[in-house]
Amino acid sequence: MKHRTSPNRSPQSRAPLFEALVAYVQQPKVAFHTPGHKQGKGIDPAWRQLAGENIFKMDLTVLPETDCLFHPTGVLKTAQALAAKAYRADHSYFLVNGSTGGNLAMLMGVLFPGDKVIVPRHTHKSVIAGLIMSGALPVYIHPEINREWGLILNVSPESVEKAMDKNPGARAVFVSSPTYHGICCDLERIVKAAHLRDRVVMVDQAHGPHFLFHPSLPTSAMEAGADICVESTHKIISGLTQASMLHVKGPNIDIRDLEEVLLLTQSTSPSYLLMASLDLARRQMALHGHQLLDRSLNIAVRLKNSINAVKGLCCLNTEDIKPFKLDPSKLIVFVDKLGLTGYQASKVLNEKYGIQAEMADWDYVAFIFTLADGQAEADQLLAALKALAGFCQPNARLKKLDIQFPSNYPAMSLTPREAFFAGYRTIALRKSVGEISTEFFTVYPPGIPVIVPGERITKEAVEYLTAMKKIGAILVGPKAGQPGKIRVVA
């Protein structure tokens, strides 16, 4: 049963950390502590004029009144307890290093060196980083792919169950749901199957912090019974950038181990602005989440229908990805029938119509519709897309991209940790086929690794990266720092 929130709920109407910051800045204190700008008095005047004074006054540090994130006994302890209550968790932790920090903490807090973990191969690069840091051994499973759309979907319960049965010693299952595109797997079935086999279930739910608060949204990780999950509060709801949460439920996670790892994966000078934004975002969703989402999701559904009615445009729909589910707040608009690449369409929308998309790919542009958006924003986007469609030649058709995201992943030759720390040599990417990579190569966004440390580089991967670079994609990862180069095991 999802939350049906009311403004009269208590104690969710409190925001204890935010309230403590407000109370503190109203006191006549003389600061002889960090940060050095001393509540904005030393900030650059141009920045202070733009942002105002209060934001800097609340940029504080660990004080008796503001509590300590890593040993909370006061307002932070209360704020995190309220978050746990709101998110149906037993424990919740504020993260100031984004969901990347949460993924690192999950993997390092649950797994020991040599432990096997079942991981989707389309996972975010921070998960691979967690494997490197933890020393755990990945058992990769392949996601389903819609070849018509050229879109990675998610992992099926059958593939997870098969991997667990083939690897009875695997300690945990890691799932990414929703994906960057809002595509969700059957979490309830995966969790049930994993728990029947005594596996811990970890979920990267970075793009689903809103799921719990509206019945028309996919099932959240905590509702599905996952043991631990990370959510990017800043991605869809109202946390500031980098502000995320980690939720734990049930007896399968050693809280002491997890809290020790959180000391390693977060700054010892956490931003109180970020943490206050988490406190307020939780309060906002607990009190008004259903109402806010009801409005924005209804507008998003109408907007999607209107876009589908525009000649040459087509939105990704749930029917296109069955049996997976789709977050309706993600609008994936295909523009190939306009004769444009997604990169070209995104550039025109930005520069000519003032519409900034979340991301683009070969044949689509992705937009995120959040609780901050209303009818005015929907009308602006629709008008810009109609103008874009009218500008293009009728009956134009973009050639289908011959190269798609690699689906034939090579067997792991070294563990990610072994490869990352191995001796290396730097060679041209085009000459790297058959070599073992020591580094990531990703197309960003969304940051899914095409090449992973420890895998042999395939011709398919090199051709895909080369093609994506030519059409305007951003390639991220090579620590060699040289375009067209990659480090491989010596």
Image: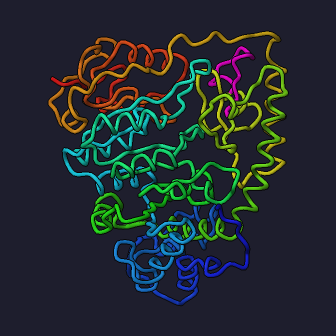
The structure residue drawn at horizontal position 41% and vertical position 82%, both measured from the top left corner, is: 63
**Side of 87 where 108 appears, left or right:** left
Which of 257 and 17 lies nearest the eye of the viewer? 257
Q: How is the image coloured?
A: rainbow
Vertical position of residue 432 compared to residue 225: above or below: above
Percent from the top left, x then y, of residue 371?
71, 55
The structure residue drawn at horizontal position 63% and vertical position 21%, both measured from the top left corner, is: 363
The structure residue drawn at horizontal position 35% and vertical position 72%, both measured from the top left corner, is: 70
The answer to which quarter of the image holds residue 381 is top right
Vertical position of residue 52 compared to residue 415: above or below: below
Percent from the top left, x then y, of residue 17?
52, 77
Percent from the top left, x then y, of residue 187?
51, 46
Q: How many marks?
A: 0
Task: State which quarter of the image contains the C terminus.
Answer: top left
Task: State which quarter of the image contains the N terminus.
Answer: bottom right
Which span is picked out in magenta?
A: 332-345
Q: Is residue 186 magenta?
A: no
**Side of 448 where 150 appears, left or right:** right
The answer to which quarter of the image holds residue 401 is top right
Percent from the top left, x then y, of residue 421?
18, 37
The structure residue drawn at horizontal position 39% and vertical position 52%, both measured from the top left corner, is: 195
Residue that lies at the very extreme toward the bottom in this rendered image = 28
Which of 370 and 30 lies nearest the eye of the viewer? 370
Q: Is residue 40 visible?
A: no
